[in-house]
Image: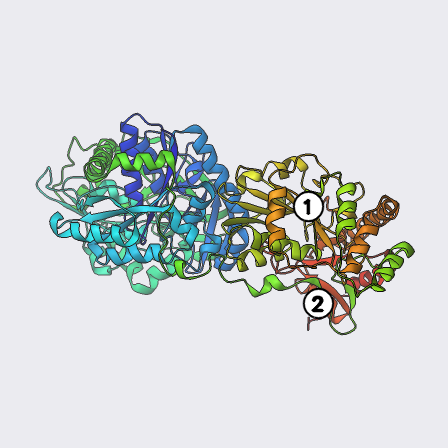
């Protein structure tokens, strides 16, 4: 069996992580090579991989369930919230950026590429990949930048099961609503449901399951029981249990542990092993009284050390912790908690607060460094080996000069009296060390406590994973699920309203209708429209004038069709004349039965507009500026029945290799290549217009750009005869005017080739000169572009579009092209004399009013 499955949930904490872990364990027990995958995780509970990368702790647990070593491939994007509005973004286990929600949207294209690369590599290495979604797949406000839910399923055609928590109530509404709010394509990927945390009478539940299946057309693949005492690591601190109890003590008395629940607690799982020890109770708390009363207080890690230290002082916990240290009562600081115990914290990296006072309970000082330390150290303490620890921090602790009391080493940290501090997470998973530590805590606390001699955290975790897998094996229709993994989503699943009631293409965003001519207002100099402004040659003007003298006749396209066929060495059945490229796109969208299309962006936006209007479900495939906006055929969904790509692409100027374009062909798919600007590139490299076999391919050509005929509207389609026949069937009679046909016949004749070449050479030279001048002025210009336009931006002039309009120049704002953000503009190529005033305007400093 080979394949993959996505596990989504009706909400956070519905059980996705544990279901994924259990399914991984169940498949691994059957001898299947399986790996977990979570494209994007938001959690401050993390783990360190063997190669020093940081991933979500849940994925490390899932890897253990699979019996394999955790890898950054399993969680390529990790978000660690540093505040309520901003998160630290880790890519492949390493710090990548700090971003708020709006900034994150700009990162989505790059992150998506990396997510797919990681997923594909896991698919290559393992038979099965079990993917975990994030939150709910029906966050409709976030679908455009989704990485972990149905975007991933869509890109790789993954069957998706939705897990719901019945213990919270409302699970049937949650299942139905999750499905109904999805778009048509996303609904087609959701194959069924799993009920989690059930603890009632199965007979009472059964009618509801039957009704859900009848309403949605999808089965319930299983009902999983409530596993109240399942002891496995939580996904994040938001789901931290209020208490952990290891059961009856091995000795005479118990030990109580108070773990401070910081606003930004990280790696809360550090205390799980303490709570698994018989006779130990761990409670998470924000109460100074509970912290004062416990036998041991634990100050855990923090994603915002300075901010959480300030919170400690504001709520009275700092005073309670200080009093514990003064009276010799046990206190442990881990990572960020250890840093708070220092005398001073110098932080220009995480908080930017500079030097602040710590609690001064340990004789160390802390300095934050720009480079994050990620390691899996080993060592000894109390004569016991510690082999399970890991470090994740920016802050470096340094000892102060020796004081009146000696400070003893403690796991690369230190101990002073009953106060311990360490940067190591996960150390208490080492059994001998944990027992020795608890014996010393009991001594300081005056408790007659004896650790159990046989508590084995690793073995316990393995037993818990097997118990989880046993529950899944008993409650799931595993044969049906494994069949889905191997075959993918079945065809013909019902579509629920509201998706079923709206046009499949959806609403057309208004800004997609913004084109260069909209910039031409008043008497602005035109650098917005990519049409050659050279005067028409005499032979072309004469041909148009002659046709204008015969306007009483209906147009006859035969001669122009023959000219296009001869120009590109094609049979006439593979040529269709149109009123410009815009009509060509409309005819294809309307003539071919609507389905699923993919538009490679950034590019000319009209194809997406007309496809949506014709009822197509349109997916945007964003190319990556860091990759030169290169076309990567494997990023186009396999299920797309129509793909549109520009070559050279407007506005980036990207010239895609012919092999990459042809690699898009699939049985049952039409590839539409927009070559409206191809004739403006000398020799038309990479053009498909004249290759012998265009089965499954349609090339869109225009005569309005190079020849300055935008007002005449003339273009044509070349290629797949069946697709052209479908387009012709919806084309109005006499769509192309007589003068336009005469112009086409003249421009496509062999006699026109020298003038066409001269114009293309001039445009290329002018483009190169403009790009050079822009780069000399500090503008960013994509390398290797082609066509009569230049895409550019300046890092210090974000209002460049408005700035140039105020100076009297119209350029095309480029933020309306999907995949391009504010600051980008497109400048039409003109001759150097015409361009000189524009460059002079760019030399002027920007005004504050712009």
Q: Residues within 10 Å of mark 1 (few under 14, many from 20)?
A: many
Image point 74% across, 56% down: which residue?
Answer: 714
Location of residue 839 in the rendering, given as x and y in whole percent from the top left corner: 81, 60
- 828 vs 346, left or right, is right
Most distant residue in the left direction? 252
Q: Quadrant location of residue 387?
A: top left
In this rendered view, identify the residue nearer to me: 336 or 493: 493
Q: Secondary structure at mark 1?
A: loop
Q: Secondary structure at mark 2?
A: helix
Q: How is the image coloured?
A: rainbow
Instruction: Tell me if residue 265 can be seen.
Output: yes
- Front disc: 1 or 2: 1
* Residue 132 in the image, given as x and y percentages of width and height: 36, 43
* Disc 2 packing (10 Å; few <14; some 14–19; many ≥20): some
Residue 312 position, x and y percent, is 33, 59
Q: Which residue is mark 1?
A: 647
Separation of marks 1 and 2 at Cα, in angstroms: 24 Å
Residue at the spot x=70%, y=34% of the render? 692
Q: Is residue 12 left or right of residue 559?
A: left
Side (left or right) of 715 relative to 96 = right
Q: How many marks?
A: 2
Which residue is labeled 2 in the image? 519
Task: Give the position of the C terminus as an image quadrant.
Answer: bottom right
- Residue 407: in sight, yes or no? no
Q: Nearer the viewer, residue 502 or 426?
A: 502
**Is residue 554 depicted above or below 339 in this figure?**
below
Percent x, y of residue 518: 69, 67
């Amino acid at each position: 069996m080979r394949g993959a499955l996505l596990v989504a949930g009706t909400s956070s904490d519905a059980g996705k992580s544990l279901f994924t872990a259990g399914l991984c364990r169940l498949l691994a027990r059957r001898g299947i090579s399986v790996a977990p995958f979570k494209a994007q995780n938001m959690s401050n509970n993390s783990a360190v991989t063997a190669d020093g990368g940081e991933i979500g702790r849940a994925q490390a647990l899932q890897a253990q369930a699979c019996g394999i070593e955790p890898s950054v491939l399993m969680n390529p994007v990790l978000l660690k919230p540093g505040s309520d509005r901003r998160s630290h973004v880790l890519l492949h286990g390493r710090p990548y950026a700090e971003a708020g929600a709006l900034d994150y949207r700009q990162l989505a294209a790059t992150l998506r590429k990396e997510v797919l690369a990681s997923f594909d590599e896991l698919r290559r290495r393992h038979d099965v990949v079990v993917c975990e979604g994030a939150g709910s797949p029906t966050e409709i406000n976030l679908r455009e930048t989704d990485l972990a839910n149905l975007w991933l399923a869509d890109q790789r055609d993954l069957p998706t099961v939705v897990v719901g928590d019945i213990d919270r109530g409302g699970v049937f509404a949650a299942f139905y609503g999750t499905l109904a709010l999805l778009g048509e394509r996303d609904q087609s990927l959701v194959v069924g449901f799993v009920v989690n945390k059930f603890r009632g009478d199965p007979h009472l539940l059964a009618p509801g399951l039957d009704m859900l299946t009848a309403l949605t057309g999808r089965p319930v693949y299983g009902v999983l029981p409530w596993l109240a005492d399942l002891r496995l690591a939580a996904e994040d601190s938001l789901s931290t249990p209020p208490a952990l109890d290891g059961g009856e003590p091995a000795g005479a008395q118990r030990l109580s542990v108070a773990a401070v629940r910081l606003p930004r607690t990280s790696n809360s799982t550090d205390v799980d092993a303490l709570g698994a020890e018989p006779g130990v109770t761990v409670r998470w708390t924000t109460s100074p009284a509970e912290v004062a009363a416990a036998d041991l207080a634990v100050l855990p890690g923090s994603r915002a050390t300075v901010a959480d230290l300030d919170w400690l002082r504001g709520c009275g916990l700092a005073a309670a912790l200080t009093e514990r240290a003064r009276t010799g009562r046990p206190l442990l600081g881990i990572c960020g908690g250890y840093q708070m115990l220092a005398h001073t914290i110098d932080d220009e990296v995480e908080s930017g607060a500079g030097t602040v006072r710590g609690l001064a309970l340990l004789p160390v000082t802390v300095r934050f460094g720009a480079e994050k330390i990620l390691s899996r150290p080993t060592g000894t303490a109390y004569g016991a080996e510690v082999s399970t620890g890991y470090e994740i921090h920016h802050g470096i602790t340094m000892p102060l000069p020796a004081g009146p009391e000696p400070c003893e080493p403690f796991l690369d940290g230190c101990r002073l009296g009953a106060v311990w501090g360490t940067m190591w997470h996960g150390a208490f998973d080492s059994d001998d060390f944990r027992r020795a530590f608890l014996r010393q805590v009991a001594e300081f606390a005056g408790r007659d406590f004896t650790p159990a001699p046989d508590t084995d955290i690793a073995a316990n975790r393995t037993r818990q994973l097997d118990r989880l897998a046993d529950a899944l094996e008993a409650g799931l229709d595993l044969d049906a699920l494994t069949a889905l993994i191997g075959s993918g989503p079945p065809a013909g699943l019902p579509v629920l309203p509201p998706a079923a009631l709206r046009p499949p293409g959806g609403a057309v965003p208004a800004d997609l209708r913004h084109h260069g001519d909209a910039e031409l207002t008043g008497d602005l100099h035109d650098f917005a429209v990519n049409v050659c402004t050279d005067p028409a040659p005499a032979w072309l003007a004469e041909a148009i004038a002659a046709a204008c003298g015969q306007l009483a006749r209906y147009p006859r396209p035969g001669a122009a069709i023959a000219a296009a066929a001869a120009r590109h060495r094609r049979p006439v059945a593979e040529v269709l004349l149109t009123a410009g490229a815009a009509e060509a796109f409309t005819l294809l969208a309307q003539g071919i039965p609507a389905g699923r299309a993919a538009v490679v962006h950034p590019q000319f936006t009209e194809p997406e507009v007309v496809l949506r209007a014709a009822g197509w479900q349109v997916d945007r495939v964003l190319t990556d500026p860091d990759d030169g906006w290169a076309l990567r055929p494997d990023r186009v969904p396999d299920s797309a029945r129509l793909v549109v790509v520009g070559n050279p692409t407007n506005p980036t100027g990207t010239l895609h290799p012919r092999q990459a374009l042809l690699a898009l062909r699939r049985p049952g798919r039409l590839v539409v290549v927009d070559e409206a600007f191809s004739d403006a590139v000398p020799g038309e490299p990479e053009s498909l217009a004249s290759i012998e076999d265009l089965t499954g391919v349609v090339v869109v050509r225009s005569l309005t750009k190079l020849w300055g005929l935008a007002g005449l509207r003339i273009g044509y389609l070349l290629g797949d005869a069946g697709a052209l026949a479908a387009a012709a069937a919806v084309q109005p009679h006499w769509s192309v005017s007589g003068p336009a046909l005469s112009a086409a016949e003249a421009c496509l004749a062999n006699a026109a080739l020298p003038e066409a070449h001269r114009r293309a050479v001039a445009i290329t030279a002018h483009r190169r000169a403009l790009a050079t001048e822009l780069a000399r002025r500090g503008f960013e210009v994509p390398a290797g572009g082609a066509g009569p336009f230049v895409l550019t931006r300046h890092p210090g002039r974000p209002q460049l579009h408005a700035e140039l309009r105020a100076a009297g120049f119209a350029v095309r704002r480029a933020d309306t092209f999907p995949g391009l953000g504010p600051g980008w503009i497109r400048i039409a190529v003109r001759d150097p004399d015409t361009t000189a005033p524009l460059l002079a305007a760019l030399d002027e400093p920007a005004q504050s009013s712009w």
